[in-house]
Image (cartoon, grey):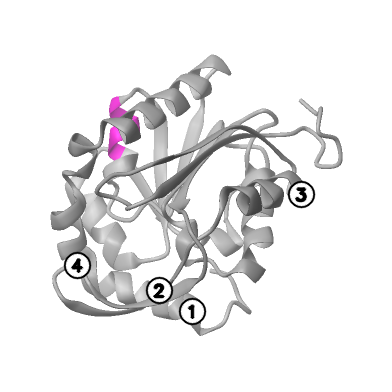
């Protein structure tokens, strides 16, 4: 786990521990209802395979519904999440997959060991002053040229979610961002943005999608 991240990290962990069972119950069907999201995930899977395949990290995997979908698409995928409660449900619902406890603010993976990385509506709880740290970890663990898929809520400002998923109490900050800001952060962190867009689904009233790749040299936009 990361240190120096303040109480928001503990609040996020505790909140998702509390709601884990109801979260799984209320979200496990969402991909069946969201063809646009399935299409984006299929494109990401194709990009990983086009570069020869390899391990894929689903960072902020929650109860593993997207991890499992990527597994069904043929990827060698594993999940990482901050919440032990969420991971307990993930392991129970998807016993054939690997899940590990960890924080994207201090990602415990070796350098250049993953062929692809996805953060599906999980950056939404990361404050602005931690985004650079998180993206630096993403770049560090990805192989050069490896694809990164981000999904996030589009908009401005931050709200505090105090209740959710079955009416349980929560205390999580939800940050909304614009594509130009996300793209600038990615560029500064050594990524080249390949595609970006929006979608509306049960997951988000206005969701942002960015597909990027890790540059070989964070100082060079043309690095492989």
Mark nearest the camera among 2 and 4 is 4
Q: Is residue 72 left or right of residue 178?
A: left
Q: Which residue is mark 1?
A: 8
Q: Residue at x 61, y 51 (%)?
A: 182
Q: Which residue is mark 2?
A: 12
Q: Earlier in the sequence, mark 4 or mark 1?
A: 1
Q: Badge 3: how crowded within 10 Å, few (<14), some, or many (20+)? A: some
Q: CA–CA distance between discs 2 and 3?
A: 27 Å
Task: Name which quarter of the figure residue 89 lies in.
Answer: bottom left
What secondary structure characterizes most of the magenta part?
A: helix
* Dots 2, 1 in contact, CB < 8 A: yes
Q: CA–CA distance between discs 2 and 1?
A: 6 Å
Looking at the rendered structure, the secondary structure element under dot 2 is helix
Q: Badge 1: how crowded within 10 Å, few (<14), some, or many (20+)? A: some
Q: CA–CA distance between discs 3 and 4?
A: 36 Å
Q: Which residues are magenta?
A: 68-72
Q: Earlier in the sequence, mark 2 or mark 3?
A: 2
Q: Which residue is mark 4?
A: 165
Q: CA–CA distance between discs 4 and 1?
A: 19 Å
**Rendering coords of residue 118 (x, y %):** 48, 42
* Dots 2, 3 in contact, CB < 8 A: no
Q: Residue at x 13, y 56 (%)?
A: 25
Image quadrant holding the C terminus, namely top right
Q: CA–CA distance between discs 2 and 4?
A: 14 Å
Does residue 69 show up magenta in the picture?
Answer: yes
Q: Which residue is mark 3?
A: 188
Task: Name which quarter of the figure residue 23 lies in.
Answer: bottom left
The number of callouts visible is 4
């Amino acid at each position: 786990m990361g240190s120096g991240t303040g109480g928001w990290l503990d609040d996020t962990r505790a909140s998702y521990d509390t709601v884990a069972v109801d979260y799984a119950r209320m979200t496990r069907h969402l991909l069946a209802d969201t063809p646009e999201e399935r299409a984006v995930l299929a494109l990401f899977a194709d990009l990983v395979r086009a570069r020869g395949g390899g391990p894929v990290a689903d960072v902020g995997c929650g109860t593993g519904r997207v991890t499992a979908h990527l597994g069904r698409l043929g990827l060698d995928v594993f999940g990482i999440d901050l919440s032990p409660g969420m991971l307990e449900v993930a392991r129970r619902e998807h016993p054939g997959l690997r899940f590990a406890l960890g924080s994207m603010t201090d990602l415990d993976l070796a350098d250049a060991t993953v062929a692809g990385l996805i953060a599906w509506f999980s950056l939404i709880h990361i404050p602005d002053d931690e985004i650079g740290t998180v993206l630096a970890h993403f770049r560090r663990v990805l192989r050069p040229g490896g694809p990164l898929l981000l999904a996030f809520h589009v908009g401005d400002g931050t709200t505090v979610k105090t209740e959710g998923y079955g009416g349980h109490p929560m205390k999580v900050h939800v940050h909304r961002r614009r594509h130009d800001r996300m793209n600038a952060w990615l560029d500064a962190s050594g990524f080249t943005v390949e595609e970006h867009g929006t979608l509306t689904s049960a997951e988000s009233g206005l969701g942002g999608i960015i597909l990027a790749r890790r540059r070989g040299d964070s100082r060079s936009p043309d690095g492989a």
